[in-house]
């Protein structure tokens, strides 16, 4: 899907004094040790092209690793780093050699890289490498904190720094932090194999804005949150208590002028093109440009090319594939093995299929200058991108930028992020040699009108959605996310302060305390019968209920039988079962229904539907209560369970529309019950029986408690446990915090 330039796009205009701090693993310049001393190598990548103008406009800074730990000649090295800081505002973090190795070649590229590219079989994990990853992120954090000024916008880049957003949030709570993931995000089936997966997700959630290359990556991140952390999210937001994390899909672009400029005015580029045009005259040129990485599908491409030459004899001596494979991470065994395999395939193809006048495969195993690359882009009739998994693949966009005349064909792997916005390309499955070969043959035979139509559309889009447009969109989204944070906080609950509620509790003389059970006083149990209260909860409820100033009500979705068995012996405790359908007051010896004449004749109609969903969902089951039927899916696969829960609720809502029944989503449940059976109705009944309290505390953790919060008086201390949107006035992080507050109230009252 293309993302056209929006005419009224809000271009980032930072507030007065605001700067942009870019944080990436590597700086756009790298130090290299040579026999003559230290050399500075400048990056020609699109990221540097986008960031440098933004940094210049705001007086911002770029923080990253210089690429060498520099144990030798450190004085000369430090002088170069100081010059970078002075002239370019590039600030190098200092990573000790052992930390740098474990961080970069270890956890980042032997653990994260294979998993994020859906190659879990390549995963290698060493706990020491994880320690280095944490240490490196802390070093980056310290560097950012040291350079930060109020109102700065911090933009963190890529998988090497996934812990950094939360580290910054802890050190700089009010800072604007954005994170962009340049590589793909893995499927929710693959992501859980990652060692330290929880810490990575929690690290990312420290940002105000999380942006991904594609909508697929964004949705897979949301699925991972649900599967690993049990955290639900909306399509564009994750709610973390009083702070939202905005989610965006923002595909990165290139700087097209850097390529068209060389085509139009660079003599070196023109000479390369002229020489190669003469050399390959009469032959169609296929071009592939990759880093020599197992995610790029180089062996798969070579096997498909061999298949093409064997199956299409008419192409003999009429086509040549130029394969550029830039070495990378050569210190890792997997990459050495890949290089060996590619060398073997190159030898086989040229040795078995070549002739004295024709070398079918030109293999270049080195990096090449930009002038050479642009000349090759212009020369190539077809660019062949065969990535097995890619966040975007900017090579595809670079090739298109070099085809302003519309003459050329892009063959693109459907597993590259670029496929989502470059629909005019010929898409391939790089794992399918035969069909890939057929597609390449089609590209070589494509007539000029079709070539021009496809390439012109691609070229216009690449030029329009350039890297500068991407940078503006990201920073505008970050600014909006921070603004949303302020608006969100205005409408969100405050953090409950134990001292304030204790003082209010002690000043009062008539108190109503209403407490949810599951998820509020105890953790959720896998099965209803396993939710037996521990003695510490029984003691706490006994102490609160024993205070003559208190009416304590325990509200639960549990059946009256279970509540009676577990809590019936606590004197003065009021019990409310099935979320408000039945209650037992302080003075009563029996249970009563809030609707004495309510019928349950509907159950035989609804039960088969729920049983059907049990059959579809391993691990789920149906619980029958007096006034309700509940489908539990806590033990089911999380993503599948949530998907089916949505389907079930949608089906039941249509079916029950003309009845008093409703389908309610709870914590890993779908409950069918009468609309009147809710905690809001129950607290209204309690207030009728216990009028005029001057202190009301109502606490709960899930959707069923929102009715309670909504119907409680505005002066009540309504408390929500955990993250997520709520109508409550206050929030605590977890049930242990709430239990501590309740224990404080009980002991404070007894001490007076």
Image: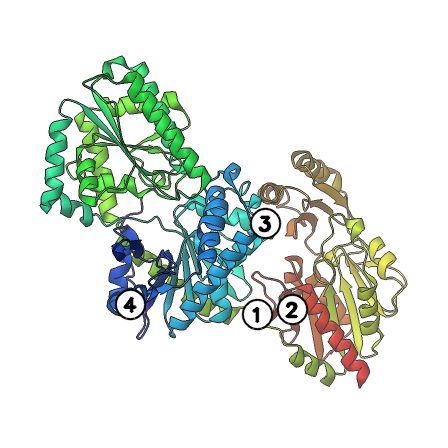
Q: Say if mark 3 contacts mark 1, CB within 8 Å.
A: no
- Report how far apart the C-alphas of labels 4 and 2 lie in the structure: 57 Å
Q: CA distance from mark 2 to mark 1?
A: 8 Å
Residue of label 3: 228
Q: Quadrant of the N terminus?
A: top left
Query: What is the number of the mark on residue 493?
Result: 1
Residue hosting label 2: 719
Q: From the viewer's side, name the closer residue of 602 and 83.
A: 83
Q: Quadrant of the C terminus?
A: bottom right
Count of marks placed on residues: 4
What secondary structure is found at the residue carrying circle 1?
Answer: loop
Name which quarter of the figure residue 539 lies in: bottom right
* Up-down relation of residue 684 to residue 383 (above or below): below
Confirm or deny contact between disc 2 and disc 1 (CB under 8 A): yes
Query: Which sits earlier in the primary sequence, circle 2 or circle 1?
Result: 1
Residue at 68 percent across and 54 percent down: it is 675
Where is mark 4, residue-wise?
A: 79
């Amino acid at each position: 899907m293309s993302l056209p330039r929006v005419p009224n796009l809000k271009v980032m205009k930072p507030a007065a004094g605001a700067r942009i701090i870019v944080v990436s693993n590597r700086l756009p310049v790298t130090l290299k040790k040579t026999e003559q001393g230290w050399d500075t190598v400048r990056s020609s990548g699109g990221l540097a092209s986008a960031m440098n103008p933004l940094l210049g406009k705001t007086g911002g800074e770029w923080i990253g690793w210089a690429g060498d730990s520099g144990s030798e000649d450190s004085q000369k090295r430090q002088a170069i780093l100081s010059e970078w800081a002075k002239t370019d505002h590039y600030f190098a973090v200092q990573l000790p050699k052992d930390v740098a190795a474990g961080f970069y070649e270890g956890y980042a590229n032997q653990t994260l890289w294979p998993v994020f590219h859906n190659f879990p079989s390549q995963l290698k994990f060493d706990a020491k490498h994880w320690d280095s990853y944490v240490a490196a992120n802390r070093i980056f954090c310290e560097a950012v904190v040291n350079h930060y000024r109020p109102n700065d916008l911090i933009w963190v880049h890529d998988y090497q720094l996934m812990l950094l957003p939360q580290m910054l949030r802890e050190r700089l709570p009010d800072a604007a932090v954005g994170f962009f993931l340049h590589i793909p995000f893995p499927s929710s089936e693959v992501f859980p194999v990652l060692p330290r997966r929880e810490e990575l997700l929690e690290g990312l959630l420290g940002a105000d804005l999380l942006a991904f290359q594609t909508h697929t990556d964004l949705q897979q991140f949301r699925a991972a949150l649900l599967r690993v952390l049990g955290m639900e999210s909306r399509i564009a937001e994750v709610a973390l208590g009083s702070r939202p994390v905005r989610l965006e899909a923002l595909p990165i672009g290139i700087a097209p002028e850097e390529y068209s400029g060389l085509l139009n005015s660079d003599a070196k580029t023109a000479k390369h093109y002229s020489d190669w045009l003469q050399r390959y005259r009469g032959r169609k040129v296929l071009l592939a440009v990759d880093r020599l990485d197992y995610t790029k599908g180089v062996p798969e491409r070579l096997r498909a090319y061999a298949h093409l030459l064997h199956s299409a004899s008419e192409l003999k001596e009429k086509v040549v594939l130029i394969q550029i494979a830039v070495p990378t991470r050569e210190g890792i065994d997997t990459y050495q093995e890949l290089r060996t395999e590619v060398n073997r395939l190159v030898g086989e193809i040229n040795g078995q299929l070549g002739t004295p006048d024709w070398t079918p495969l030109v293999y270049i195993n080195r990096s090449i200058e930009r002038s050479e690359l642009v000349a090759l882009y212009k020369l190539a009739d077809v660019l062949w991108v065969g990535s097995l998994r890619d966040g975007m693949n900017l090579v595809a966009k670079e090739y298109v930028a070099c085809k302003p005349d519309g003459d050329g064909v892009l063959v693109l792997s459907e597993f590259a992020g670029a496929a989502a916005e470059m629909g005019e390309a010929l898409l391939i499955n790089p794992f399918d040699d035969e069909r890939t070969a057929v597609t390449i043959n089609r590209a070589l035979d494509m007539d000029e009108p079709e070539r021009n139509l496809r390439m012109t559309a691609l070229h216009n889009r690449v030029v329009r959605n350039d890297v500068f447009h991407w940078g503006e969109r990201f920073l505008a989204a970050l600014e909006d996310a921070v603004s949303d944070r302020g608006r969100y906080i205005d409408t969100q609950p405050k953090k409950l302060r134990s001292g304030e509620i204790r003082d209010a509790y002690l000043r009062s003389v008539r108190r109503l305390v209403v407490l949810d059970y599951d998820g509020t006083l105890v953790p959720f149990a896998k099965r209803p019968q396993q939710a037996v209260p521990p003695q510490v909860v029984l003691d706490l409820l006994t102490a609160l209920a024993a205070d003559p100033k208190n009416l304590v009500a325990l509200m639960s979705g549990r059946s009256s039988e279970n509540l009676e068995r577990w809590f019936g012996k606590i004197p003065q405790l009021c019990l409310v079962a099935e979320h408000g359908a039945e209650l037992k007051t302080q003075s009563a010896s029996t249970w009563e229904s809030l609707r004495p004449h309510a019928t349950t004749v509907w159950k035989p109609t609804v039960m088969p539907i729920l049983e059907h969903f049990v059959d579809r969902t391993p691990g789920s089951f149906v619980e029958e209560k007096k006034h309700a039927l509940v489908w539990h899916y806590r033990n089911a696969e999380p993503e599948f369970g949530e998907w089916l829960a949505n389907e079930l609720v949608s089906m039941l809502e249509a079916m029950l529309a003309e009845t008093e029944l409703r389908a309610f989503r709870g914590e890993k449940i779908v409950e069918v019950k009468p609309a009147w059976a809710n905690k809001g109705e129950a607290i209204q009944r309690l207030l009728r029986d216990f009028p005029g309290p001057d202190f009301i505390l109502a606490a709960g953790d899930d959707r069923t408690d929102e009715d309670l919060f909504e119907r409680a008086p505005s002066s009540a201390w309504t408390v929500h446990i955990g993250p997520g949107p709520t109508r409550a006035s206050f929030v605590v992080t977890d049930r242990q915090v709430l239990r501590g507050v309740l224990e404080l109230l009980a002991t404070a009252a007894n001490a007076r």
